[in-house]
Image (cartoon, rainbow, N blue to C red):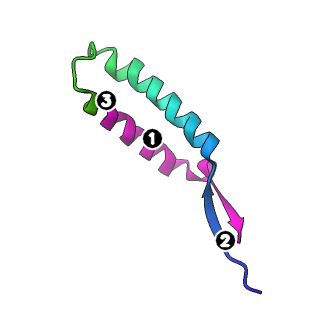
Amino acid sequence: MISMKMRRTRMPRVLAAWVVLLFLTVILVAAPTGFRWGYWVYGLVWGVATTVIHYLFRGFFEEDVEV
């Protein structure tokens, strides 16, 4: 029988990272600018940060499972 491996996202870790990075975006980017920029700018910063962190540490956020 052939065994295959798939990558599965560890959602609790991803959600925790999203919350932490949202908090950091508000504290380090939005607050110093006085929340003057559009919300889409902060969303873009947060989205890029979460994507980069997930990519760099994907071994922490994903696991290989046998199917």
Q: To which residue does mark 1 refer? A: 50
Q: Is residue 11 magenta?
A: no
**Image point 45% across, 24% down: which residue?**
24
* Residues rendered magenta in the picture: 42-67
Label 3 element class: helix
Q: Name the residue type under label 1.
A: Thr
Q: Residue furthest right?
A: 1
Q: Are the residues at dot 2 and dot 1 in contact (C-beta closer than 8 Å)?
A: no
Identify the residue under disc 2. 5
Marks 3 & 1, CB-CB < 8 Å contact: no
Q: Residues within 10 Å of mark 1 (few under 14, many from 20)?
A: some
C-alpha span from label 3 to label 1: 12 Å
Q: Earlier in the sequence, mark 2 or mark 1?
A: 2
The span from disc 2 to disc 1 (Cα, nearest Å) is 25 Å
Return the residue at label 3.
42
Mark 2 is on which residue type? Lys
Classify 65 as above or below 27: below
Can you say which quadrant of the picture contains the N terminus?
bottom right
